[in-house]
Amino acid sequence: MSLLPATLAQPLLVAIPAGLVLGFLVLSAYSFLIKPLSERAIARHTQLAFLACGVAAALLLIDRIGQGAPLTLDLNTLVHTGHGLLVPSFRIDLAAASVLTLFMTILGLVGRYSATYLHREPGYERFFLLLWLFSAGVAMILTSARADFLLIGWELVGLTSVLLIGFFREREQPVLAGMRAWITYRSCDIALILAIVGMHHEAQTVDWSALYASAPSWTPGTQWAFGLLLIIGAMGKSAQAPLSGWLPRAMEGPTPSSALFYGAISVHLGAWLLLMARPIIATQPGLLILVAIIGASTAFSASVISRTRPDIKSALGWATVAQLGVIWIEIAAGFTTLAVIHILTHALLRTVQLLRAPMALHDIRARHAASQGAYLSASAWTKALPASAQQRLYAIATSNFHMDALLQKLIIAPVMGLSRSLDRMDQGFAERVAGADHDQATLANGEQAPNHSQDHSTTRATR
Amino acid sequence: MTTLSVPWLALLILIPALYGAFISRQEDIERAKLHATIASAITILGSLALVVFIITSTPQTWLDPLTWPGGHPLLGIDGFAAALLPALGLMALAWIISTPKRLATPTDIGTMLLMLATTMGQLLSMSLDTFALFSVLWALIASKSDTEPFNRRLRHRLLIPTSISLLIAAIIVEVSTVQDPLAPTLTQGWITSGSTLEWLVFGLIALNVIVRLGFIPTQWWLPSLMSRGPLGQIAMPAAAMPAAWLLYRALCPELFIRHELDTIAVWLAASSALVAAIMALSQHNLRRLLGMLTLVQSGLVSVGLVSGISQGSVGGLMLWLASALALTGLGVTIQALESRLGSCSTLVIRGAGANLPQHSLAFLLFGLMAIGMPGTLDFIGDELIFEGAIHAGIGPTIASVLAVGLSGIAMLKAWSEAFIGPVSEAAKARVCDLRRQERLVLSLLIVAIIGFGVLPHGLLAIEARFVAPHDPSAQQHTAAPAQQLISTAAPRH
């Protein structure tokens, strides 16, 4: 017997993502077309919205306690694309309700923290608007009953993450870090989209429950293919090796966004996708072993790297990656409830740690004083290694286990090289057909594109 | 199929054409823009009235009462074309209103209207000769109005001959027994005997489609053309993709019967989109980037159209409509940016968002819409196209998804290079942000794209008039007979 009647619980389920999307659209339209919102107005609206969403999520959580079957709502009759794709379809069970409640609570707390932390910061309004969009994406992912609907939230979370990494626009590094994250996300999204399209083709549906039922009947090759694509799709957001490099860089964003995205919420969504996809992945034991290997290698490498980082946010970033690796191992081993509990506790811990990060020096001094001048020593297992091995490990760790260099060398550089070659070839063709143009060389490398509009008007005037 | 009592379609084309000719003779740019705005607004309203009429009427195809001397139809409309016409009007309106007065002449504004008229003419053609005529007119007007010597040479040596080749195909159809590929009376594929003349006509039409949609190996002309010259006059017809209409109406019925040719077509379209997306990654010139993104979209639209299942066709239509609007918004923003900072190279205008935040937001929004971010019609279109592509094979699907993914990377890379980061000297110039009229047209475009994206019922209702009488889920995984596929994709026959 559920606590809430279905007539109340189902609207609540839709109201959380829909309300957040609507709120974002209304506030953005007001700001763009009428006048920018004041700090107080946007902060209050945000806090109020997150409070309401938190209460709604808590009600859903209470409603789901003791309920075996998830609460579902299919809006196929209300909104449909006519071809069985992108049907808004919602589903929530105890695990999803727990995670949603916690994430909404963290969003509300960090929203309150940010109102003070970012006071008078240029981009204050932008930060909060992106927070709305991000929270809508998170709510969609957690309440989605279908893989394609999950993709909508997935993309929104990815985009807002990237825009918040590059929040401090006047500096070079945040912009580059944002691009790095975007490239990783987008590359992994390609795999996720392929998996969704392929599964829809194979099973005629992308409803998770129907996919779980259908997956065992697929051929081993299909199971391997879709399983691999789903794993790759989850790897990007979870920053699993060898795609971990973007996460510590992402700490270039403001501290509240680091706490939300790379401590509490965003990074755990990869693990959430893996949890959702686990019944499909589990059709091939080899895939579960692969997940465990990825998780173990991530946990090991990130743990070692974390110990070599001199700045607190970067160290916390790598420590987060290490814990995510452990969560992946738990999922692979079938401890899904443990993985959900790990997600919840880890999210809370990292939020606190990252929000305290600006005061790290103060904290260390306090600990230093409390320990009467004794510095904390290296861990026992590090000491157990011979000195030469320690040095070698340190060298490898400082270069992030060469993960970034390998990705740059094997993927990014060849693709960009191909792009430039094709572009040069294209311009060569155009020159051969239309004759050489004095602008051509400059246009080719983009060093200085002439103002064609002005040239054009001058030509007109002359004529 | 019924004939209209009044030549509404001819009037719909004549209004912008006459206004265009009239405006080109004026000297006052302000008056020219005002008249052009009125003309495009009338076109939008007329198109919307037609959409309502098509939705509420029983026949799926309506013919204009005006005919060629031989009696064969000149113009006609169905749900598919009806869905595109208001978007075309909106695109022209956006370019006309947003073109800075100091950078344009009345001739430029008039040309825009003539482009609108000839593009609409191509979409409403019910015979190959009508299409070819409008196509040649389009190529000649574009060439005459383009003042850049490089562009004129490119048009004279490539685009005009290509359009003339279509005219030759139309003449062959007129003087021989080859059936008109665009005739609304056809009940099946138009290559009946497999004669050399029929295949020659097929080849000429295919050549036209390949060149004008920028399929490999001819993808180089559009970015080169867009790099210089008046942006609106090049970007608007490119984003409208009238050649995709030719592909869908004239080639698809034959491609669906001949599966080996269809496979080649899907591969060609998907690889063209992928190549353009790869090239877009290294672009620093926003005009060239716009050209590349246009190529990606035309490749993806074509994948959907030639995929052979209704999901693909509907996705193609959706993406066609949405990308035309999104690319227009992106083009308008690039033009506004260039007119203020004097360059559209990301290496020159670095950090432009510091002084031009609305430009930055508009570029980001339209860029995201053009690459199919969730909540937009592009996103739904992309998903349906992938469904169509997977029906054709795993290779084209991977190429299509890669094209979408890479174009997303290219777009955000260009945005971050141009608008954020340390502010360059050029971007420090004190210039105004988006003007009120620019904000207005961009808002209209956003509302149209998001409106259709969140609630695509309206578009599906229009499209249903054309592609409806079948059950897509029943056909999706079955090797449908060729005739059934034709009736799915082109029930006008």
Image (cartoon, rainbow, N blue to C red):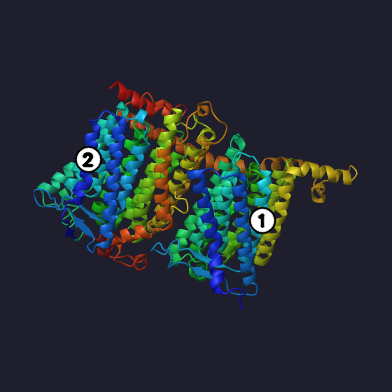
The residue under label 2 is B17
The one nearer the camera, A43 or A368, is A43
Label 2, label 1: how far apart the Cα atoms are = 59 Å
Q: Where A447 sits versus B321, above or below?
A: above
From the viewer's perspective, tell me whether residue B18 is left or right of residue B350.
left
Residue A177: tell me if it is visible: yes
Q: What amino acid is at disc 1? A: Ile
Whole-percent x, y for residue B117 in the image? 24, 42
Q: What element carries label 1?
A: helix
Using the rendered view, name the quadrant where residue A108 is placed: bottom right
Furthest-top residue in this view: A462
Whole-percent x, y for residue B289 in the image? 42, 38
Q: Quadrant of the N terminus of chain A?
A: bottom right
Q: What amino acid is at disc 2? A: Ala
Count residues near mark 2 (Cα–Cα under 10 Å), then give few for <14, some for 14-19, many for 20+: many
The residue under label 1 is A106
For mark 2, name the chain: B
For mark 1, name the chain: A
* Residue at 31% in and 58% down: B462
